[in-house]
Structure formats: C-alpha cells, structure tokens
Image (cartoon, rainbow, N blue to C red):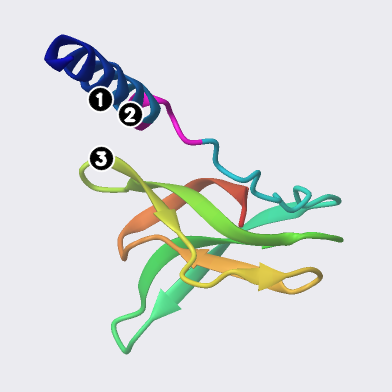
C-alpha cells in the first residue's frame, strides 16, 4: 500500500513539473501596419548666438505611426552615432531628429512605432 501511494505521489509530482516546464502560449500581439509613402530629408540647423551648426533630419509618411532616426557624424572627430526622435507621431505629421552640435546627418530613416 505504501509503495502504491509513493508511486502515485511521484507520478503526480512529475506530471506537475512537466506542466510547469511547458512554455506558456502568449496571446498574439496585434502589430500596426508599417508606415507607407514616406519621405525623408536632411537639413542644416543652427543654435544660439554663436551660430553652432549641426545636421538634422525629418520624416513624413502618408500612413502609420513612426519616429525618425538619423545617422550622425561628428565633423571634427569623425565618430558616428545614431539618434532617434524623441516623440512618436501619426501620419501625416513630420517627425524631426537633430544630431548633436558639430555633427552632420548622413542619413535619415523611418522607424515604425
């Protein structure tokens, strides 16, 4: 009797551990359609009384929700980096991004939100 109880208990514990180890199925997440009809452009900007020049970019799309991303290059050091716009916008609004002072924008891209 004790042996049968131990076997039943062991089987129950193993069954529960198998259930706990099974990956949970996540509910599918609805993703928005990517932006379409997008136009990007680079602009020269200036700041303050010393007229510190730097590059920036803008993005405008026909549909979707998006942000702007710029690949920036420091003019003096040659070091590059990526900068994202702060806010997410809905089409047809313009998303703007600015490179740090002394840098120029080499490219501007759309980032779906």
Residue 80 is a magenta residue: no
Could you classify mark 2 by the number of other residues whose Cα lies within 10 Å: few (under 14), some (14-19), or many (20 or more)?
few
Instruction: Tell me the number on the disc at residue 80.
Output: none
Q: Does label 2 or label 3 sit earlier along the sequence?
A: 2
Tell me the SS state at disc 3.
loop
Q: Range of the magenta residues?
A: 20-24
From this view, report whether residue 108 is shown above or below residue 67: above
* Residue 36 pos. (x, y %): 83, 50
At 65% from the left and 44% from the top, the residue drawn is: 28
Label 2, label 3: how many angstroms apart (C-alpha)? Answer: 55 Å
From this view, report whether residue 101 is shown above or below residue 111: below
At 40% from the left and 64% from the top, the residue drawn is: 54
Instruction: Tell me, yes or no, whether the two marked residues, 2 and 1, touch with CB atoms within 8 Å.
Output: yes
Q: Name the residue carrying label 3.
A: 79
Tell me the SS state at disc 1.
helix
Q: Name the residue carrying label 1.
A: 13
Q: Is residue 105 left or right of residue 102?
A: right
């Amino acid at each position: 009797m004790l042996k049968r109880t131990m076997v039943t208990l062991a089987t129950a514990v193993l069954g529960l551990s198998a259930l706990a180890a099974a990956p949970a199925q996540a509910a599918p997440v609805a993703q928005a359609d990517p932006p379409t009809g997008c136009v990007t452009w680079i602009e020269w900007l200036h700041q303050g009384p010393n007229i510190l020049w730097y590059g920036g970019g803008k993005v405008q799309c026909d549909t979707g929700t998006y942000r702007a991303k710029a690949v920036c290059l420091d003019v003096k050091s040659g070091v590059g980096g990526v900068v994202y716009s702060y806010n997410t916008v809905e089409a047809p609004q313009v998303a703007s991004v600015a490179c740090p002072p002394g840098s120029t924008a080499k490219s501007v891209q759309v980032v779906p939100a």
